[in-house]
Image (cartoon, grey):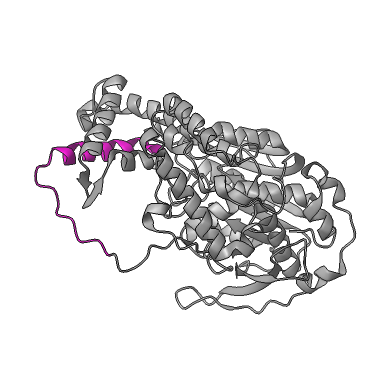
Amino acid sequence: MRSRNTRKAPRFAVGLAAAALSTLTLTTACTASTASVASTAKAPLKDSLRTYTQQKLQWKRCDAKNPAAFQCATLTVPLDYGDPGGRTIGLAISRLKASSPKARHGVLLLNPGGPGAPGLELPSGPLLKFPAEVKRRYDLVGFDPRGVGKSSQVNCGLTAEEQADHPYKAETFAKDVDRARTIAGKCRARAGDKLRHLTTRNSARDMDLIRAALGEKKISYLGMSYGTYLGAVYTQLFPERADRIVLDSATDPTRIYRGMFQDMAKAAEQAFARWTAWAARRHTAYGLGDSPAKVRKTYWDLIARANRKPIVLDGQPLTGDAIRADNSTFFHVQKAAERIAGLKKAAKDKHPTPLGTPDRGQAPDDSYFSAAWSSMCADTRTWSHVPAEYRREAIRDKALYPLYGDFAAAITPCAFWAQGSEPQTRIDNKVGALITQNQWDSQTPLFAGRAMHRSLRGSRMLTVAGGEGHGVLYAPDGNPCADKAATSYLTTGRLPTKDLTCRAPAGQQ
């Protein structure tokens, strides 16, 4: 699940948010089974939570690069909601107030995805182009989830090799198992006291502490990719606190997380098949083959060639596995054709661009990678701890989905991770929400969005027919039809009476 930023989460070629503190007993929130969460929502407030709900935030200008109106503060939250009197951590939050106090409806909390993506800059950053009507009615609020960015960031001290994606191969499997074990061990050594509490359930509780600290009875929310799962967990834990919920490019909440990776492999294969047909119809322009079969052969020949000798493109040597690891290549058919045509040309170049000397003096930033695995491994107890099971599934998926199956099913650090503090949340409620989905999103596929729609029984779904890429709403080159529907819901509170379909620009067909 790629977040809408330029950083790459593990196994995402992209790289897809507590307590209703005045209504939920914290002990119950932390120990109740997922099936009974909704029934506990009217339990009395524990006195020990008042310290958090009655905080007075100290707002100040975030930094010199942003307007003075864009302000930041730090919210104190419990590390362990089962022990609210214990250790605390800081949560970095930001706010851009509604431009019209008289028209103000409330707070719109934002999350860009991940897990592991920072969201502090969202209210004022370039990622989301909100229309004036939304800005008039809402305080736009961003935050870095626990373990991320300025919110008690987790760093495991991982090398570039440990952060890279690796496909399953029989000859390297023992090494891959050792790498996954090492990553888990490094994270445990660096942040072992935090890891089991860096969960989506706790991030959802943090969201409700934000609500309480801002003095709001309810919050509205826009989450993208993984942020849709975070938003869904919030609606499950605190249905009475959820106002207007928009979930852009939704995950399947029943497939968190290993199943989600494997669904990416299936969707990538579908996108690849679509692309080969598109490129074949444009053979004159790109020279990749005049039939889907020929385009497919061109691609796989390039992969084999690059695995024998890396292809230098834009000064970077790329192996075939490195090319395949970026399964976002097929997000957009035209961009994919341009990239593969460029690789084909580069493979024939006998005088490639000289490579610079890599800078080995500075360790790579592993914060996104570390936070992502910390959340994904602790969120669910469905990760196998038997390496042989990963081998079997990888062999199967490599045959089923040649483009990406051996990446998506490969062993992960979660095979060696300590158990999270709680079971996974089961999403099943009637909270109203608008779910928006591109037809050809290979990170959070259309079938995943439909699964979220089924789990949120009060939701409506908007599908962009022919829509490419990961992310629908309020993008610089977004879909006006989808933006209009989301804005209407956010400003009026009225969901569409039925599911909707918008059309992608003609060039994507």
Total numbered labels placed on residues in the image: 0
Foreground residue, 355 or 493?
355
18 in relation to 301, above or below = below
Residue 50 drawn in magenta: no
Residue at left offset 88%, top offset 54%:
42
The quarter of the rendered structure image containing the C terminus is top left
458 sits to left or right of 414: right
451 in relation to 237, above or below = above
Residue 482's x, y, as percent? 55, 42
Q: Is residue 3 visible?
A: no
Residue at left offset 30%, top offset 25%:
296
259 in relation to 245, above or below = above
Residue 303's x, y, as percent? 27, 34
Residue 347 drawn in magenta: yes
Foreground residue, 344 or 109?
344
251 sits to left or right of 476: right
Foreground residue, 317 or 75?
317
Indicate the quadrant where residue 345 lies.
top left
Foreground residue, 421 or 90?
421
Residue 415's x, y, as percent? 56, 44
Q: Is residue 108 visible?
A: yes
The span picked out in magenta is: 330-359
508 sits to left or right of 377: left
Secondary structure that dominates the magenta span:
helix
Residue at left offset 40%, top offset 44%:
175
Residue at left offset 20%, top offset 29%:
287
